[in-house]
Image (cartoon, coloured by chain):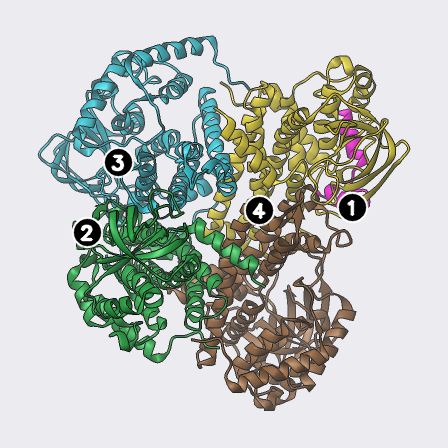
Chain colours: A cyan, B brown, C green, D yellow
Amino acid sequence: MDFKDTPELASFRSDVRSWLEANAERRTDKLHMGMEGDAAFQEAKAWYQKKARAGFACLTWPKEYGGAGLTPLHDVVWTQEVEHFKTRDAHFVIGIGNCGPAIMHFAKEEGKRELLPRMASAEDVWCQLFSEPGAGSDVAGLRTRAEREGSDWTLNGQKIWTSGAQYSDYGVVLTRTDPTVSKYRGLTLFMLDMRQPGVEVRPIKQMDGGGHFNEVFFHDAHVPDSYRLGDVGGGWTGALTVLMSERLAISGVQPTGFPQFLDLVKSLELNGQPLASDPIVRDRLASWYSQYAGLQALYKRMLTAVANGGIAGAEASMGKLVGAVMNQEIANYSCQLFGPAGVIQDSAISPERAHFQEQVLFSPGVRLAGGTDEVMRNILAEQVLGLPQEPRADKGMAFQDIPTGPG
Amino acid sequence: MDFKDTPELASFRSDVRSWLEANAERRTDKLHMGMEGDAAFQEAKAWYQKKARAGFACLTWPKEYGGAGLTPLHDVVWTQEVEHFKTRDAHFVIGIGNCGPAIMHFAKEEGKRELLPRMASAEDVWCQLFSEPGAGSDVAGLRTRAEREGSDWTLNGQKIWTSGAQYSDYGVVLTRTDPTVSKYRGLTLFMLDMRQPGVEVRPIKQMDGGGHFNEVFFHDAHVPDSYRLGDVGGGWTGALTVLMSERLAISGVQPTGFPQFLDLVKSLELNGQPLASDPIVRDRLASWYSQYAGLQALYKRMLTAVANGGIAGAEASMGKLVGAVMNQEIANYSCQLFGPAGVIQDSAISPERAHFQEQVLFSPGVRLAGGTDEVMRNILAEQVLGLPQEPRADKGMAFQDIPTGPG
Amino acid sequence: MNFEFSENQLLIRDQARNFLTQECAPPIVRAALESDSGYDRTLWQKIVELGWTAINIPESAGGLGLSCLELCVIAEELGRSLAPVPFSSSVYLATEAIKQFASNEQRSYYLPKLAAGEVIGTWAHSEGLGTAAATAQVMDGKLSGSWMPVPDGDTADIALFTACDAAGEVRLFLADLTGPGVARAVLPSMDPSRPQAQVTLNEAPVHAMNAGADDLSALLDSAAVLLAFEQIGGCQAALDMGIEYTKQRYAFGRPVASFQAIKHKFADMYVALELARANAYYGACALANDAPDLPLAAATARVSAIDAYYLVSKENIQAHGGMGFTWEFDCHLYYRRAQLLAGVIGTLPVWKEKLSTRLLEAA
Amino acid sequence: MNFEFSENQLLIRDQARNFLTQECAPPIVRAALESDSGYDRTLWQKIVELGWTAINIPESAGGLGLSCLELCVIAEELGRSLAPVPFSSSVYLATEAIKQFASNEQRSYYLPKLAAGEVIGTWAHSEGLGTAAATAQVMDGKLSGSWMPVPDGDTADIALFTACDAAGEVRLFLADLTGPGVARAVLPSMDPSRPQAQVTLNEAPVHAMNAGADDLSALLDSAAVLLAFEQIGGCQAALDMGIEYTKQRYAFGRPVASFQAIKHKFADMYVALELARANAYYGACALANDAPDLPLAAATARVSAIDAYYLVSKENIQAHGGMGFTWEFDCHLYYRRAQLLAGVIGTLPVWKEKLSTRLLEAA
């Protein structure tokens, strides 16, 4: 056990640090940076392309697919160093983090060589199209139909909660190709060209007023069979790869709200007293820190496992579960500390406080996106602890016969 | 809305107070009094008989069954006044609180006139025999068999968690009379003479070392058909009456640990500082008090409803759920406050601290007895909020075909 | 002992519920939320016509001469319907303060107007971010300073200001917000359907009221009880909404409401609500009977109402899944209102400290 | 960066687990719990023979010259098996203190005996109920006073006492508990399988060690990390026990473990355990590398280990239903041990305060 880099990693860290110093701006606070608007997207794309040209994108991908062919530990070093800088990677995380591994695993070689390098260099942006209005926690309950038309496929239906759909060139889409078999067996996974007339993207207005997510409608959208990922009817396997990658990707960047809370406690005075001297605040700080530090250390343990040739398991769901809940509780607690002024949401009056007010309204979404608290607990219970499934009401039924309720 | 007694109740309160001053000892602390040993039982019986002779037992029962024929509000007044005195009612609560109402409702008139007055005067002690080793939360999964023998019945099987079985003259026992029909339909409820050779009582040693509970074994125990409560196969209805009464009875006396914690905070100094000046302790105190006061007020609301001719519903489960959890958390928190000395469990060294140490070890049982937290939440969800049942794995099956696992 | 409202009070509650179901359906709240003013003048006028602003004002001053208990049942329904009106500011705070602490002259001038809804009042306590203590000082009957957030400060005609008198004692002062030396601006806030303002006084004339720190504290206690009823009303509506939705919505071939994790979540929400409700009822009884434990009962009602509304409005979103996070669904209206009501008259830390102080001081 | 034990350390862990599964099965623990002494002399002797008491003692002093990491893996297994032996008192506290703070003479006298298990050491810190500060004072090399609870104070041969020197400074003193002026008595406690004693000194001769308040604090930090491994070991065993039982036990025609409320309970228990484990690993790494953030890491490891073990041992009882409350089932052994380990070297409030102080002082 040690904290030190190997000589190779130390040298890599030094390269990363020099490059970042030269090409990125140091961050002065720990405030959340969301992705908002076209200007932000253009800025992000320029940044990512610069990073890719310097060889720092997709560090663990093979070189032939546009990666750097390095190890997960190089990725860790990058993550540790980049944390101190203002960067914008959020638009590319879903493509590179979630879609990439599935393509790497399930696409034909030709498709991989065509699409992955463009993804790695941020030339193409990708999104992930799984959730539907009637299929949230029960992802496999989806109804978007893909039907054979000659050797190719035609898609009809609707997806929802698609981050970045408006910026995306491609998507990975999970569809139903056979409603007459049980729900997990009738699914097929495709890559999809988002820039076609049969694909319509509409933003969703969130409860906090933001619009990070979209609905995507397919009206006879066209997909060549060469864009199929895996077997017809074998889509659930591919989807699980994507979902697992998603949770792993999330677990590293899952907002917990803790660093911001620590900054707040260190800096804020209320009624002439530093927050840092309030015993109740200190008590809460200690409880949250012990969770936060646990998540950080857990992440390091997972990375050690990956570096040792293991795979990150469903344990990644813990980061999602704990972080999302903590994030909401911290935001609410902070606003309560602010007293009556806590309800004012004006970054012009106090940017550091507005952060927590924004999080009060945004944090409920974090508990839902990428799987609810309840889904995370189910995954931990069944996949990690091996507890038996509940009796399934839809077990053995053809998809088309599963009750869907009055809705 | 008001706190005042009607003139009639005010006069009753004054009678109660005078009688208690003359016949009971004022209590000086809020420490828990368990029921332990034969001497305590004899003392309790003497106390209860005195109380019964004075006309203060079973206040709401009809006079012909040994009660006082008064209203639930008289009961409230009694409860409020008796709280300030050292009394011992615990041995009679189950009989009078749980068994009594079922007998009142389901027994034949002759049985009622024979048995209820003796219960009311504490001449007979009763216990309740429902739970079995293989049937805890799933009470109706019980296996104790009652078989017809001529016009009477023979019982074989085993019950568990029977409070006060060793002191009891009678019991109310739930049995299976038909394993070939679905589990709720094959049950029958009986009164049982505990003083017969076919009934064997063995104490259970609890995790805290105590022995409030027993196992009870039936070897061809005999029950006359006149002791049957309700129809053959209709036992579940009677059992529900008992269980509902149990929860209502519990909700009034459910330990929460709060009064003791408040006393502790008011009296204890740690490291030369009063606990009452510790902001973190005050913060916890406020949280627990808001729950405790809520339970107290909820109980008053239920009593108002009962006094107005309503019935207490499954809301009573709230008192059980909240109080039991709070009780455990308070005990643990208090011992943590005591520092390293918290682990010493010696009432000779510090009786007020030993209370919390005892409760650390006893409180897990409170969360289980009379229905677990999970059972309480199920009751609230299904019976109060009307949420749909889970799909039942044993639905429609004959009892004898229900899977019982490898155990 | 009686812990239930009278039949007449329950009748008023039913009428209020019917009225608000009709006149304050979610689209009305939503329109206020999305408007600039965040206040529904038409609804306010209808409420005034029903006499709700006059309930607890003596008949001699143009009121109905009813009690705080009638206000409690109205409060519950206003909370349930998320009514976008300045009722709490004007009725629980300004009207009560004028009733109790104003001169005879002011009372006979203002109470009939407050009863008739011609004048809307509010209360300005918070001098800025995180300053609980009053620092502004009244000199020669004039007050300068800046208060925020002032609930309904943009629509109110008069306001009570907490400020120091010439001797440095904290007292209550009454100012006409439509008069000289007053500037106000709406602030962005977490619940724009109940807007908060910054009110700046520049040598504005004010009238001292006969209320010191203790009176102010008593005023807040009665408001805490009434606000608790608004909170449990909203809480109940959010719980009902979540139950209804999850009964209809299916996943894995069965209603979402049939999953134990969801059922137990609702059970916990229900428990929090019922404890808060019981504490609010106790508070109402203490308020109506002017009981000695009112300060403790009020703090208890407020603490558990804040806790319950936060929990229930938050978990209602969660139970809705993704749809709960949309602007289109009403879940966030309750969550926002929970934040607003938790903020006005002071947040949890302050009220928990009040509670423990009062509890430890009690016999 | 590497957050895993070495292969050799993992091998030691596996061997320890196999050994303890054989030699420290639940009946052994139960026998200790129900005995008067609460200490299994046979098991202790076997542990000594395996060299565990010698692990972190230099070879020059009769030890194995291994590191604290080997101790961590052993600690986890001792915790898992609930071993009724004075290992933590003697090894994490007394041996470490003598290694670091004793004179050369004392070291060469005691370390070989500690390594060989001939001498058992402990640490007496708490002067009585709720007194954290040291008040007893050493005069002319002699100490009088009463300490409780002293873990393993009845079986230990030597003990370190926290007391004031003649100048009133808190320092560490070493005393021979088998010598003159020492009286001791076992106290009833929540975990009699790891007995606590009252130790009373009456002008007992003591030797000053070269350790002031800061050194003492560092000693507690290293013990906190090692104890955290005992805690996560016990936690894991309790979690495994609950899962195993509920898989076998049926209710309503299906395994109890298939009910979502139970599954989610286990998921929450697992999360608490894994966070505690991760913090313990980080603490081990900081300890092994003498990292500057060891004080923060140690406090973090201790806080989350206490939280996790309490939660898991408590909910393991709950998951067992009524049987979990019986003496006969082993659930309470973990729950009792969780209380014991939460008490020794200081409880949650103290360590949370240490944590926040260290966190806020960090850059």
| Callout 4 and callout 1 share a chain | no
If the image is split into quadrants, where does the N terminus of chain A sit?
top right
Q: Quadrant of residue A373?
A: top left
Using the rendered image of the protein, determine whether residue C289 is visible from the camera's viewpoint.
yes
Which residue is farthest right? D180
Q: Disc 1 sits on a residue from what chain?
A: D
Q: Is residue B230 visible in this depiction of the protein?
A: no
Q: Are marks 3 and 2 in one subunit? A: no
Instruction: Tell me the amino acid under the disc marked 1.
Output: Leu
Q: Amino acid at mark 4?
A: Asp
In this rendering, which labeled residue sits more in front, label 3 or label 1? 3
In the rendered structure, are the residues bearing label 3 and label 1 in contact, judged by CB atoms less than 8 Å apart? no
Tell me which segment is drawn in magenta: D26-51
- Determine which residue is flagged by label 1: D187
| Relative height, residue C354 to residue B16 (above, below) | above
Residue at the spot of label 2: C180
